[in-house]
Amino acid sequence: GDAFSTGQYDLTSHWLCGMQFDPNQLYQQFHSEYYKPIGTRVDTGGDGARTRINNPELDAAIDVLKNVDPADPANRAAFDTALDLYMAQSPAVPLIQTVYPLLFSTAYWTGWPSPENPYTIPAPWWSHFLFAMGSIQPA
């Protein structure tokens, strides 16, 4: 943990979380606003910040993404630009994506998160599940 937080590593394997509904939730953690030199502890910005990327072009793309609607097809070019810049430097390379099927019955409770209404992460082991518990109603 110390080596990861202070950049004292050559290669690391760790979670790369961050994109639930908006790709910028992933990219934001690679913004150089979180950059610290090796040997300095990084304690904000998520695991992406611990890669210590410092790329002004990627920063500019991320700054654009902060202000666009990810659901609007007109913004696709902005997301493609960020992906191209990210992949060119590859500060982190995901090796696996875990898929967790989450099933909910509406026999007794309604209002679960769904593709039509993805108001929170529906995984019961995440703290976000609190929002589901506060939103479901008796059937």
Image (tube, rainbow, N blue to C red):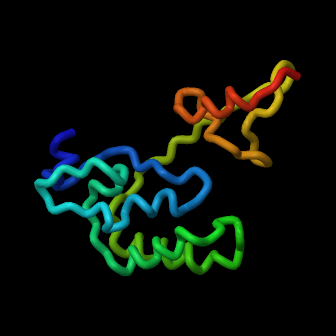
| Above or below, comparing residue 25 to residue 102 in the picture | below
Query: On the rendered structure, is 39 left or right of 46?
Result: left
Residue 107 in picture, x, y percent from top left: 86, 21
* Number of disc labels: 0
Quarter of the image holding residue 121?
top right
| Above or below, comparing residue 95 to residue 73 in the picture | above
Residue at left offset 75%, top offset 33%: 112
Viewer-side residue, 86 vs 42: 42
Residue at left offset 50%, top offset 79%: 81
Q: Quadrant of the C terminus?
A: top right
Residue 83 in picture, x, y percent from top left: 48, 71
Query: On the rendered structure, is 66 left or right of 117?
Result: left
| Above or below, comparing residue 10 to residue 65 in the picture | above
Residue 104 in picture, x, y percent from top left: 75, 28
Residue at left offset 33%, top offset 45%: 14
Query: On the rendered structure, is 42 left or right of 87?
Result: left
Viewer-side residue, 18 vs 93: 18
Residue at left offset 50%, top offset 47%: 97
Residue 45 in picture, x, y percent from top left: 36, 54
Query: On the rendered structure, is 12 left or right of 110?
Result: left
Quarter of the image holding residue 99?
top right
Viewer-side residue, 34 vs 50: 34
| Above or below, comparing residue 33 to residue 50 in the picture | below
Q: Quadrant of the N terminus?
A: top left
